[in-house]
């Protein structure tokens, strides 16, 4: 039997992600993480239904590779993911992804999608970090710390203590169909972006890092 016939989608994802690290221990960590995601969240089935999930995970993993020299450096790090995704998100009409494995355009529908599940926080949790996710959608069954927050409201993250995170990212809010529907005017979305940047600056510890910020690009 040919190799590609016995290799499942999860194995192929592990092979692609492993190339982001040279150290064998890091490659083993990322393999263990992907296997855990399959066990906890039926990743193999979701990859079969929506191949774009692999690109989402590659995008998130690539950001970690650019931000941390070793995956062991994530141990115990308190990391905030703003608009982390949820288990109730729906697919927009179209979605363009730029990832370490290439670029992909995904055609959408109005149904539920695994693309917007909280993959970044899940990955961090499996790698031994302490992720905190905030999102308006449902996160009740997730193992990591999470809060339901309306990010369209000024001061919505004021309850989080100042200088309490080693790293922060935001990347999923402005591509969310729910957010776009709530804030159709670009000026209103710009106000939200400014609020998020303000909060990122407030919440980051001295010496902390911004892993990725869509809000800062507005």
Image (cartoon, helix red, strand yellow):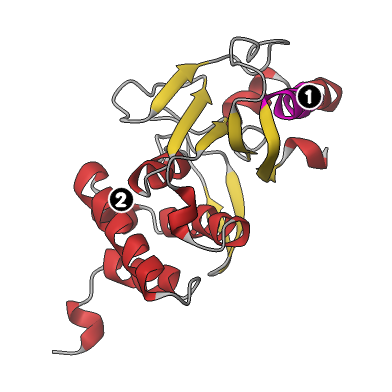
Q: Give percent across and percent down for residue 18.
A: 41, 72
Is 195 part of what is drawn in magenta? Answer: yes
Residue 204 horizontal side relative to residue 72, left or right: right
Q: Residue at x 57, y 30 (%)?
A: 83
Q: What stretch is highlighted in magenta?
A: 192-203
Residue 208 horizontal side relative to residue 107, left or right: right
Q: Which label sits on residue 198? A: 1
**Quadrant of the image containing the C terminus:** top right
The secondary structure that dominates the magenta segment is helix
Q: How far apart are marks 1 and 2 (CA)?
A: 36 Å
Residue 8 horizontal side relative to residue 196, left or right: left
Label 2 neighbourhood size at 10 Å, few (<14), some (14-19), many (20+)? some
Q: Which residue is drawn at 26% across and 43% down?
A: 41
**Quadrant of the image containing the N terminus:** bottom left
So how many labels did they put on this image? 2
Residue 52 in view in this figure = no
Q: Mark 2 points at which residue?
A: 46
Q: Which of the two residues, 186 or 199, is positioned nearer the viewer here?
A: 199
Q: Which of the two residues, 110 or 64, is positioned nearer the viewer here?
A: 64
Above-or-below relation of 10 to 33: below
Q: Which residue is drawn at 81% across and 25% down?
A: 194
């Amino acid at each position: 039997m040919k190799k590609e016939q016995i290799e499942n989608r999860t194995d192929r994802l592990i092979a692609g992600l492993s190339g982001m690290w040279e150290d064998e221990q890091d490659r083993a960590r990322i393999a263990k993480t992907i296997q855990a995601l399959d066990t906890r969240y039926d990743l193999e089935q979701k990859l079969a239904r929506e191949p774009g999930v692999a690109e989402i995970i590659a995008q998130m993993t690539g950001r970690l590779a650019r931000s941390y020299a070793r995956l062991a450096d994530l141990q115990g790090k308190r990391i905030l993911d703003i608009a982390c995704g949820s288990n109730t998100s729906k697919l927009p009409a179209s979605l363009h992804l730029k990832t370490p494995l290439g670029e992909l355009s995904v055609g959408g529908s109005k149904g539920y999608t695994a693309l917007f599940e909280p993959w970044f926080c899940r990955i961090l949790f499996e790698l031994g970090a302490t992720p905190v996710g905030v999102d308006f959608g449902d996160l009740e069954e997730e193992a990591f710390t999470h809060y339901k927050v309306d990010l369209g409201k000024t001061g919505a993250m004021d309850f989080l203590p100042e200088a309490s995170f080693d790293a922060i990212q935001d990347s999923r809010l402005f591509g969310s169909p729910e957010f776009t529907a709530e804030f159709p005017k670009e000026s209103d979305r710009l106000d939200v972006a400014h609020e998020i940047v303000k909060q990122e600056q407030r919440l980051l510890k001295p010496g902390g890092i911004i892993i990725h910020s869509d809000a800062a690009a507005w």
